[in-house]
Amino acid sequence: MTLAGAGDTVRDEGSYDYIVIGAGSAGCVVANRLGEDPALRILVLEAGGSDRATIVAMPSALSIPMNTPRFNWGMTTEPEPGLDGRVVNLPRGKGLGGSSSINGMCWVRGNPMDYELWEALGAQGWRWSNVLPYFQRLEAVAGGGPLRGTSGPIQVTRGNEKNPLYQAFVQAGAQAGYALTPNMNQRQHEGFGPMEMNVGDGRRCSAAVAYLRPAMARGNVRVVTGALVDKIQIAQRCAVGVQFSVNGQRCFARALQEVILSAGSIMSPAILKRSGVGPEQELRDLGIEVLHHSPGVGENLMDHLELYIQQECTQPITLYPAMSLLGKAKIGAQWLLTHRGLGATNHFESGGHIRSRAGIVYPDIQYHFLPLAISYDGKSLASGHGYQVHVGTKRSKSRGWVRLSDARPQSLPRVRFNYMTHADDWLEFRACIGLTREIFAQPAMAPYRGRELAPGADATSELALDAFIKRKVESAYHPCGTCRMGTDRDAVTHPDGRVRGIERLRVVDASVMPQATAGDLNAPTLALAERMADLMRGRHLPEAQDAPLLAASHWASAQRSSTILRDYASDRAGLREALLASNGRGYWLATDL
C-alpha cells in the first residue's frame, strides 16, 4: 500500500503498538522488554545494518569495527576552542547493537553516588537503591558476588590477569595510599582492582546479542535495517508515527501507543529537532516548523576525556609481540577455533577509581590499565615493549551542544563538546598526570619501569603539561546529557523519559542522563533502559534494601584513603547537599557530613 507524497509515493508500513528508533544499547533493551507481552507489536528502525562479523564478536579486535564505516558513523567534532581548534574523533555505533557493538566492553556500573547525584539534579526516582535492582536483573556475572545478578541477558566476566603487570599496577595503587577493591562493581567502587567486561564464552556480549536477537525470535518484534529516520510525525502535540526511508523509498509507520527515541546522545536530539521539537530560533533558521519550543534539546552535552600515560617496560612481557602480523594471525586462529586466548579479552583487566583532590565526595578519575603502549583506536603503537593507563576525569563541568547542519536526515549534525573550557578541567587533568606518575613510581612497578614515553620526563612545568593535554587528550566515546531528564522547566524529558510538551513520545538512551557516571557508560545505559521499560509498563522492581553508599570517612580533608569505611545511606539528605556542592556549586569544605 502506498500513500500520496509530495512528488513521490510513501510506502505505508502499517501500525505498531510501539516504534523504537535506534537499535543501539537502549533500543535493544526496550524492544526486548516491551516484546515480552505477546499481544504487542513492536517496530525497531535502525539506520545501520547487521552486526554479524568476526571483528565485532572478537573482543580483542575492538579497534577494527571502531574504524570501519560499516559499523561507525565516522563523526568528528567541530573545532574545539579549548583545544586550540583541534577536531576530535567521535565514533558512534551504526548497526544492530549500536555502540555496544564497537565499544571497549569495559563493564563499569559507575559509583552508587552517581545515581544519588542524578536524583539531586532532578531525576526523581533514580537513586541507587532504585537502580541497583535493574543492574542485578540485566547481569549474568560469572561467579556472582555481592549485589550482583547471575541470570540476566548480559554476560559479565573478568580477564584471567595472567600478565604480571595487571597486578603490579593494582599493588602500586595500594602502595601510593589508595584503597583496594575486590570488584569495583560490587560494594566498593573507589580504589584499585580487577575490571570486568561484557564478554561471554569469549565473545562480545552486545545489546544486539543479549536483547535484540531473543526479542526478534519471539515473532512480535520487527527490525528494519537501513532505515534512515526523517522525523517523528506529531499531530496536536502527540506523536502518531515515524517518517523514514529505506534505500531511498519513503516510508511511514503508525504508533498506536508510543514512539520511543533511542538513537543516542547525538542522533536523538537531531531527530527531535527535525521533528519540530527544540530551540525555536535554530529550527526557524533551518525552515523547520516549530511544534514545541524546548531550548534544552541538544544542549548540556558532556563526555569523558582521557589521556594515555605511557611507560617503557624493561621486561619483554607486554602485548607488543602480539601486534605483529604473525602475532595477530596466531591470536585470530586460536580465537576462531576455541574462542579463547588473547582474542577473548579486551585487555583492560585491571583499573582504578580515585578522587582528584580533597573535597570531592567520590571518585572523579578513572584508570584503565593496558600492558601495551598504543592509542585506543589502534592507530599509534609504541616501537617497543611498554604499558600505559588510560586516565581521565569523569565529571567535567564543560558543556557542549548538538545542532543540525541542515534539515536533511542524510546530514550528520554538528557537535561541539567545548572540551577543557572550564578552569576545573585543567586542575583535574594535571592531577591525572601527577597522580599517575606517582603510582607508576611505586616499588611494585620497579621491576618493569623504564623511561616515561608520554608525556615524557621533560614535561614537568604547568605550561608543558597543558600543551601535552591540548595535543593528546581524546574522547572516551561517552557522550550524554543532550535530552536531560528532570522536573524543572528546562529539562527536555521527565524522569520517566517522556518528552515535555509532547504526548506519546519518550527518549530512552544516554541523552537523558543529567550527569555522566564515574565510569564507562554502556552498563548504566542498559540499566537505564531496563528501568524505563518497566516505567512504560507501569511497574517497578522493589527498592533494594541493601544498597550501600560507601565513601572515605575523611573525603572532605584528604585526597586519598587506604580504606573505604563509611556508608552514607542513612544520611541521604546531607549526602545530596555534599554531592551538589562538590560537583559545580562550590566545594564542600566541612570536615564531614
Image (cartoon, rainbow, N blue to C red):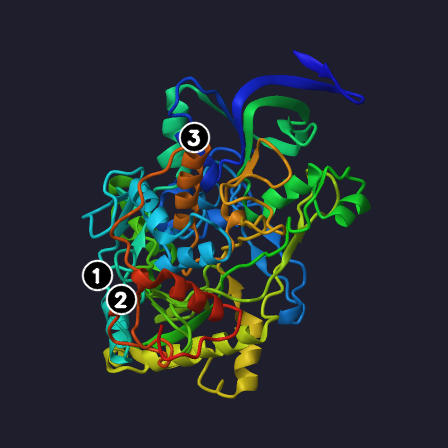
Residue 330 visible? no
Residue tagged by mark 3?
537
Q: Nearer the viewer, residue 235 or 463?
A: 235
Name the residue type under label 1.
Lys
Q: Position of residue 332 (x, y in %)?
A: 33, 47
- Relative to 548, 120 lies left or right: right
Q: Of circles 1 and 3, which is in front?
A: 3
Q: Residues within 10 Å of mark 2 (few under 14, many from 20)?
A: many
Amino acid at dot 2: Tyr
Query: Residue at label 2?
Result: 166
Report if residue 123 is visible in the image: yes
* Three-letter amino acid code of the residue under disc 3: Arg
Q: CA distance from mark 3 to mark 2?
A: 44 Å
Looking at the image, is mark 3 or mark 2 nearer the viewer?
A: 3
- Viewer-side residue, 126 vs 43: 126
Front position in the image: 229 or 125: 125
**Of marks 1 and 3, which one's residue comes earlier in the chain?**
1
Disc 1 and disc 3: Cα gap in Å? Answer: 45 Å
Image-quadrant location for residue 255: top right
Choose top left, top right, bottom left or bottom right for residue 312. bottom left
Q: In the rendered view, does 572 fall on the left or right side of 392?
A: left
Quadrant in the picture for residue 251: top right
Q: Position of residue 62 (x, y in %)?
A: 41, 50
Checking the image for residue 162, the label placed there is: 1
Query: How far across and down, in percent of the image, does residue 281 sit?
Result: 78, 49
Q: Residues within 10 Å of mark 1 (few under 14, many from 20)?
A: few
Mark 3, secondary structure of its residue: loop
Query: From the image, which quarter does the N terminus lie in?
Result: top right
Neighbour class for label 3 at 10 Å: few (<14), some, many (≥20)? few
In the rendered structure, which disc, 3 or 2, sits on the residue that comes first in sequence? 2
**SS class, disc 2:** helix
**509 above or below 436?**
above
